[in-house]
Structures are given as structure tokens and as C-alpha cells.
Image: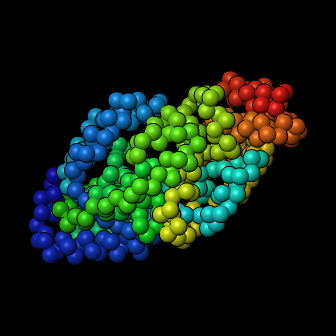
Amino acid sequence: MSEIQNQSSSYNNEQLIKLAQQIKIWGQELGFQQIAITDTQLEKAERSLNNWLQQGCHGDMEWMAQHGTKRTRPAELVSGTHRIISGRMDYWPPDILKSESVLAEANKAYISRYALGRDYHKVLRQRLQKLSSKIEQEIGAFGYRVFVDSAPVMEKPLAEKAGLGWIGKHSNLLNTDAGSWFFLGEIYTDLPLPIDTPAEKHCGTCQSCIDICPTKAITQPYVVDARLCISYLTIELKGAIPEQLRPLLGNRIYGCDDCQLCCPWNRFATTSPETDFLPRHHLDDISLVELFDWDEATFLAKTEGTAIRRIGYERWLRNIAVAIGNALASDKTNEKMISALKKKLDNKSEIVREHVQWALQQSGS
């Protein structure tokens, strides 16, 4: 970025202020609900991350400990970075009450609401690239790089510093006007744009998210132990889910939204206008047995273009087996579920077979 940095330094403060205002307007035209700008100073976030890693809270996510200080020092990741343009895009589903009703029905599958539609990485990356192109058309070539949860980037601390919201006790970003049902993406740039005011925290004494967490993964305010988190267990963990935690997963087969569903700030959330985020293949309200009956080809076809596909077919079956086992614990004679499990007893995956056997044991089989 060094050569372009010299070019961008020729802009005066008034021009940079106008450019920043225009960037925010363009961002909204491209579907972002909010665009904000911050600097690269993340000393506090760096200390918190190092403490979290030292405690082993990242579990098997070794990539969280890689790259040294590139994660917390943006200019080390992308040389010449002076500012981060941070954007948020709502994904709140049309009928949030359906989420709670699905969670209450043990025979149905609960999938985290963010994963029901098109993969957000693709949607936000394309929009941020378009935003970058608009800036380039306005001022000429400049140094930038787009990120959407795809590199060692501290997206939530950066968004908090930019004023998009504050990091709540559940570690998600919260906004007074939108709750937490939104995605984040960033543009690292050499443009010395004016920065926005950081957000203040508004959780107060509320600890609804801490109280409701099924596995007590929020070990203290603002600290989540990934090793206990259902999102980690169903998405990031590659091996067997610890037996003592399996009953706590309920019917959650991909991620968990409990800490968001209970958050008082989410009553201010508005439905996302993005049709890309609408549920596909009725995944917002579908039975466990139907999903468990999918062969690998069906899984790949039905999850094409979604975030779900990244866990692969093996983990998909593993997670559903646990959910069916939990359903059988209270409905031990459900023949459809028992039959579905028995069909997978000879699955080529040892992990799948082990979780299927555990699930059958819950029915007494």
C-alpha cells in the first residue's frame, strides 16, 4: 500500500470528511444498515485475546493462535493500513417466534438463523468489493483489502471501536437499534479517513445470556469458553462431541442462538430485507429424521452456497444423531427415529457410528 498511501495523503481534511460521508451513503445503497470507520489500535482486545488463548478457551481452533500479532495489529496483516471501514448487514429472519417454537419441538432440527440462507461470506464480500470499487471510481486507485470472517481479523473489537455497537456479555456485538442479528465485514485501507466514536456498553446488570446458555459456556461476563459452546461443538469440533455435553445440545444441530433469542436488545431488531438470507429448503422448520435420511449427494446439493456445507456430511450426521438421541430420551418408542438411526449403524465413519450407538442407547435399544 505504500505507493498509494502517498497519493491518498494529498487529500485535505475537508475532502476526507466528505469522502467518509459518501462511503456511508454508498454502503447503505449496497444493503448495509450501517458503515463506520475506526483506526487500528487494538491493545485492549489484544490483551483479552491472549488471556483467552492462554486459558485454552479456543479448544481445537488452533488458527486462533496462529499468525502472531497480525490478528490484533492490522498493519501487520496488510501493510500500510491506517483505517478500517466496518459494515454491518442485518440477517434477522422474518418470523423469530418460529425459532423458539422449533427449539421446543424435540423432533425438529434447530439451525442457527444465520446459516439458513446464502453463505454470508459471499454476500458481504461482494458488497464490500462493490463499495471499494465505488471509492476507487471517485478518487482513483487506493490501497485496500476486503475481509469477511476470512482472515485473522478482530471484527467485533473493530466494529465496537467504529461505533457499530458494543460487545455484549455473550461476546456478540449489540446495537441499540438492531440488537445482534447482523453480520460484519471490513475494508482495510490506507486512506486516512476521519474515525467515528466508539460505542458504549449498555448491558448493565442484565445477564440473561449467561443464565440461559445450555452448557454454561459464558463462564463470566464477556468470556465464552468455546470448548463448552454449542456453536463450537456442532461446527468447529471435528471429533466426537463429549458425552457429558450431548444431552445439553437438545435439537441444535448447527450452532446455537439461545443467547441472542433471550437478549432484551433484540426486541429492537428489524427483519432483514436481504432475500439472500431467507431460509432455503425449509431448513427453518424441518424434522430431524428427514435431514438424517439425506445421503451425502443430497446434503451437498441442499447445502450448496450456504455456510452449513463447511462442516461436511460426517459432522452433519454426527450432530443429528445426538439430537435424535436427545429426542428419544423422552420418547423412547419413536420408531421412525429408531429406524433412521439403525440405518446408519454401518456408516463408514467411526464418529458417526459412535454417535448413532449413543443415540440408540437413549431409547434403551
Indicate the quadrant containing the C terminus: top left, top right, bottom left or bottom right. top right
Q: Position of residue 348 (x, y in %)?
A: 72, 25
Res. 212 visible in picture: yes
Res. 349 visible in picture: no
Is 265 displayed left or right of 163 in the figure? right
| Residue at x-position 35% and y-position 63% | 164
| Residue at x-position 42% and y-position 50% | 169
Instruction: Give the farthest residue toward the front.
Output: 205
| Residue at x-position 34% and y-position 47% | 153
Image height of 65 relative to 211, above or below: above
Front position in the image: 213 or 311: 213
Is 351 displayed left or right of 168 in the figure? right
Is 155 displayed left or right of 260 in the figure? left
Q: Position of residue 205 (x, y in %)?
A: 41, 55
Front position in the image: 59 or 281: 59
Q: Position of residue 151 (x, y in %)?
A: 37, 44
| Residue at x-position 16% and y-position 52% | 2
